[in-house]
Image: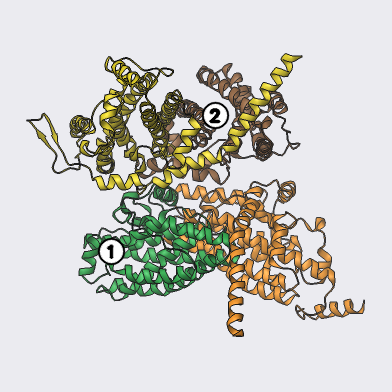
Chain colours: A orange, B yellow, C green, D brown
Amino acid sequence: SPEEIAFQERIDRNEKIEPKEWMPEGYRKTLIRQIGQHAHSEIVGQLPEGNWITRAPTLERKQILLAKVQDEAGHGLYLYCAAETLGVSRDELLERLHSGDMKYSSIFNYPTLTWADMGAVGWLVDGAAIMNQVPLQRTSYGPYSRAMIRICKEESFHQRQGYAIMMKMANGTPAQKKMAQDALNRLWYPSLMMFGPSDKDSVHSAQSMAWKIKMNTNDELRQKFVDQTVPQAEYLGLTVPDPDLKWNEEKGGYDFTEPDWDEFYQVLKGNGPCNKERLGARVKAWEDGAWYREAMTAHAKKKAARRSAVAAE
Amino acid sequence: SPEEIAFQERIDRNEKIEPKEWMPEGYRKTLIRQIGQHAHSEIVGQLPEGNWITRAPTLERKQILLAKVQDEAGHGLYLYCAAETLGVSRDELLERLHSGDMKYSSIFNYPTLTWADMGAVGWLVDGAAIMNQVPLQRTSYGPYSRAMIRICKEESFHQRQGYAIMMKMANGTPAQKKMAQDALNRLWYPSLMMFGPSDKDSVHSAQSMAWKIKMNTNDELRQKFVDQTVPQAEYLGLTVPDPDLKWNEEKGGYDFTEPDWDEFYQVLKGNGPCNKERLGARVKAWEDGAWYREAMTAHAKKKAARRSAVAAE
Amino acid sequence: QDALVEFLLRMGDNALILGHRNSEWCGHGPQLEEDIAVSNIALDLIGQAAMWLELAGAVEGQGRSADDLAYLRDVWDFRNVKLVERPNGDFGATLMRQFLFDAFHFHQLRGLVASSDARVSEIAAKALKEVSYHLERSAGQVIALGDGTGESRGRMQAALEDQWSYALELFASDGTDRNMAEAGIAPDPAELRGLWDETVGAVMAEATLEIPDSDFAHQGGKQGTHTEHLGYILAEMQFLQRAYPGAEW
Amino acid sequence: QDALVEFLLRMGDNALILGHRNSEWCGHGPQLEEDIAVSNIALDLIGQAAMWLELAGAVEGQGRSADDLAYLRDVWDFRNVKLVERPNGDFGATLMRQFLFDAFHFHQLRGLVASSDARVSEIAAKALKEVSYHLERSAGQVIALGDGTGESRGRMQAALEDQWSYALELFASDGTDRNMAEAGIAPDPAELRGLWDETVGAVMAEATLEIPDSDFAHQGGKQGTHTEHLGYILAEMQFLQRAYPGAEW
């Protein structure tokens, strides 16, 4: 349609699309799905790190971790707000999360088993997230782009904090070194999975790229991540758990082993190590909080009624 | 009445009264109250020690503690059975415990704060309990007397185990010694309270003594306990927290400071350190278990019905 | 000197343990804004704990850092009131406890800003800014939930009754407190009761909640005799420091 | 040698952690008889853990006692299946887990009685007596609760579905298992599946419960990659040994 052609031309000119402007239904739907899943990932992503707040080994580490997990909740908030500009409420999105209809990033279905995971999650998981998100700062939808700009700033701070924890551990006692290596072993492949399936198996990609909702292919970003991360691991004195990893002079990047995509699809299907715990924790928080939310609404109404009663006098 | 006179004569001849025999209503009621409270004390008494099972410092100590707390549940069972012979069901007694109508020994309203408390509870609390219970082996009511005989045997075993823990602690590291002394400091006066208020303030005593439901006065037993325990504390190298404690050659026993009876009555009234927690834990266990008990009853009925259906064929 | 250390441990341990309890909500709050708010309060309190404990270690003069004090003492050496170590209960109970504590904490810090000890007054000034906000927020929430629905009112009234006798420990002055008051270092807690009653009374009236008619006060936390809950908190909190002594993190 | 230590740790850690979980019920069971029974099973399992871990330490030959192994290893060195470390849930869920484990444990111990290693066979013979009784009891309870009321059936079915994929880890054989099987020391867990299916199938049929139609199995516990729950168990269990290193109790 002529509207669609004009819309695509705006995008091609790198104009930002704003909430009240016309957009194709497919664009709106794809964005809602993507922003919603991103928002859900932030709040489910609080859980694996939240698991170590009460056990953080120093008061300073405890404060840094608390602040970080709190930031993730804040990111969730920005993103739900961005999604709301597309005409879907936060409660609606949460309902779709709780019913299993919408997903969150599969990485959060892996457990955090030692303190070193607080380092590895920051370093690898936030690292992969940033790799995904930096290009999205230039995405075509205005509110999403602006949310990504704020989020990326904080995420790169988190990544540095994570790496700092890894440094301490990798340069610490033998037990700490062992913890750090163990964390890398467990989180390496799940981090590679964060970029999604190989381009040849990835659906929806072409249209999303044209709309500038997706800016790079999965494989491009994964390669970039590996190229960035391997030297960091070397600097830490840790071994990436991939015997076939090696520098490829020709392509100017590393050759590496693909993650186990069967595992990826299993986890997606619900058969990850912590799927039930993660979704269960979110649903429980939501259900346990129902009386609280109802009471706050009731109070707000009463207050408004009292105010208008006074005004009417 | 002539019946009452005959009854008292039997008691004076040290005959045992058995369940189906005639007894005055007051005798029955007093016994139900006393045996019921004793039973409740056993099951509430599981909680302070149960608090350390998951944290016992060695596998052997863990097994000993588990076995001990399990024995307490067993004692509760004997005593509820003894009470049932007087025409009151276990469920009825539990209901009266849960409603606050019946009490349990106030000592269990004190918390167990360190591992040394596992020693001190065994040594002092079981020690005081035995002092109360040994004479009750000769009580006039047959089932009660027989229950006490079984219980006393196990209790003195528990007391020795408690004292063994205290020995280890008192001969251990400075921190362990400090723990042991701290436990004695906290539990000394509450243990003295276990014998009940001073004779001059004690109600019901005379009739109970005549019926041989109570065999000694509170003060007699308290004195006996102090005289037995002080040398044990000395042997441990611990200091009884009573600056006025001293040997009185003339009476052949120790002079000691009375416990703070105001505190005693406060705790009795519900204002002890753990009253709410203790009763709350029992009520919760009971309510959470309702579906279980109902299901077991339903299954037993179905099974019986199936059996008689088969028999009828 | 000893009394000052004792007093500083009380300040630090109250903040640390209440911060710990609040931090348990992180990721589990009833809505995102609340999740952030409760984590934020936890963060403030743990920051305050670090300052008080650092000063306690400095005054003690045995080279113990704030982390040493937080991670290497056992229950009997902790000096927080029992109120702050009790389990969270529902979110309303957590808010009620926070309010009862904030109302005390606020008036206490106002007194401490005028401390004769400059180090104390400096920490108090920083903390007061945060705690003024804590109080404003927890008061608002208690009012909203008291005034909200029948269910929320019932939960808040139950929480108030459950916590009342624990809150009163805050005012149980002992030798240390009197010592601090005489030296002009800190206000005597007993004398803050009037201000606290006013703050609490006004909020409860607006929240339509009834203040319990009881003066029974749990005691002992400030002197190191705690509830059974603290041991579990410490087992969790201190695990890494205990399991890997001397490691740096 | 290494494989034998590994195998013995698996035996010991399963018993230790399941015993720990059961011991959490002590004083909180739904009725007195059950309280006693669940404590008794905990006691048996912890006793068995002590025997297996003692032998593990002896075979390892580095002077570690059963207590050293129980109290001074961190999560990654534990070798229990994930099933036994999960939180108890309601009493029915605890019984369901116990039954699923007992059914495996029973057949495993029967195989171990015939072990080529006399020390293993001796411990297994002792444990088998206890575990035969555990199985009899847990089977009876699962049947009764499945057959009981609508509510109890619903709870037991939910527990079965929740635990199924964790129970299947019991049969995930790895190099250690094959090594033990080849040496005639222990039966290969994978080969116990048939016997287990028979036992479980018969009980579930009588309990009117439906066996989940899924072969997805959680894995990793046996190799030291656990759930997030184990860390909390150890923080609590090991507190005294960690906080007071070298003390005797």
Asked if residue B310 is positioned above or below residue A193 in the image, the reply reads above
Q: Position of residue B132 (x, y in %)?
A: 28, 28
Image label count: 2
Residue A164 in view (yes/no)? no
Q: Which residue is mark 2?
A: D11
On screen, residue A269 versus residue A171, left or right, reads right
Number of residues whose C-alpha sits closer than 10 Å to that of mark 2, classed few (under 14), some (14–19) or many (20 or more):
many
Residue C197 in view (yes/no)? yes
**Circles 1 and 2 on the same subunit:** no
Q: Which mark is residue D13?
A: none
Residue at 66% over, 59% down: A226
Q: Of B259 and C210, which appears nearest the observer?
A: C210
Q: Which mark is residue C58?
A: 1
SS assignment at label 1: helix
Extreme front residue here?
B1
On screen, residue C69 versus residue A264, left or right, reads left
Asked if residue A166 is positioned above or below residue A274 in the image, the reply reads below
Query: As shown in the figure, which amino acid type bears the numbered disc 1?
Result: Ala
Quarter of the image with the N terminus of chain A is bottom right
Q: Quadrant of residue D66?
A: top left
Quarter of the image with the C terminus of chain A is bottom right
